Amino acid sequence: MGWLNGYVALVTGGGSGIGRAVVKRFLAEGCSGVGVMVRSHEQADSLVAEFGDRVVTSLGDVRSGWDNQAAVDTTLDRFGKLDTLVGNAGVWDFFTRLEKMSLDELDHSFDEIFGVNVKGYVLAARAAAAALRESKGSMIFTLSNSAFYAGGGGPLYVASKHAGLGLIKQLAYEFAPDVRVNGVAPGGTVTPLRGPESLGKGERRLSDIPNFQENVANSMPLRMIAQPEDHAGHYVLLASRDNSRATTATVIQSDGGWEIRPMR
């Protein structure tokens, strides 16, 4: 019996990377079903091919309140309840500095990055709130080491992840005592995290950066580059009522020891 035996979860951005690793681990830990909100039919088909009727997919854009509501409703219709929401969909700005963007690029990329990384979480929380209050469940949001430190992206990405940290604390306050709200903040990880379409980087992926793995590993005290699966256990812990019922407004930093790097 796993830590999540009989649970039902919904994962946004669960078609690849960390989100997909969370889906797989949740099912391995005993979830009776997982709803997954994805961006493409290809991702949806791949999930069903791997996990069968233990998953139900919903195609949508996390920036749409109605798409988030549809994902919640689809999960409830299939599995009858919702115990955990994992807000995970994200977009990264590839270190694009403020002065490298024109005013038009800045205007549009701000809306896109904050729309996915912040608004997407707000809308998912609103859509899932009633079901999670009923189940005394939890919300878990994916942040980044950029929620705590500069230099993990450009100003728009870093600001969006700092906003996500504030959102976790405020939602934990608003939803207590019924719903716990926590986060996981991964460091550099080999994932297909995409760039913003508004900056012409919609087809670029984090994992495509030359020497990315070596550079991250060399900068980490643990001398490693994380895989998506390395973070999935934190989501299991935070979702489990038996193992984290006293934990809310907390973010697990899963970043290879970023905070203890030497000052040199």
Image: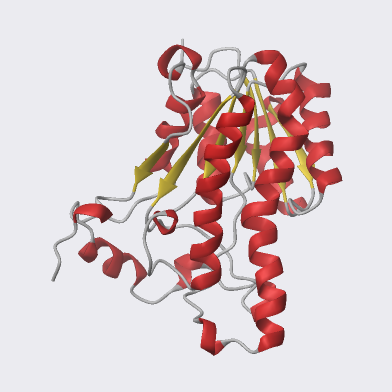
Q: In which quarter of the image is the C terminus?
A: bottom left
Number of labels in the image equals 0
Q: Quadrant of residue 35?
A: top right
Q: Quadrant of residue 149?
A: bottom left
Q: Is residue 20 visible from the viewing direction of this image?
A: no
Seen at 50% across and 24% down, the residue is 28
Residue 203 in the image: state x and y as whole percent.
Answer: 63, 73
Q: Is residue 101 visible from the viewing direction of this image?
A: yes
Seen at 33% across and 50% down, the residue is 255
Seen at 18% across and 55% down, the residue is 221
Q: Is 94 above or below relative to 248?
A: below
Q: In this view, does 96 lie to the left or right of 202?
A: left
In front here: 210 or 60?
60
Q: Is 40 above or below relative to 158?
A: above
In front here: 76 or 260?
260
Rendered image coloring scheme:
secondary structure
In front here: 118 or 199?
118
Residue 33 in the image: state x and y as whole percent.
Answer: 66, 23
Residue 5 in the image: state x and y as whole percent.
Answer: 54, 13
Q: In this view, does 133 lie to the left or right of 204?
A: right
Residue 59 in the image: state x and y as whole percent.
Answer: 79, 47
Q: In this view, does 157 lie to the left or right of 132?
A: left
Seen at 78% across and 37% down, the residue is 71
Q: Is 47 above or below relative to 148?
A: above
Q: Is residue 260 left or right of residue 199?
A: left
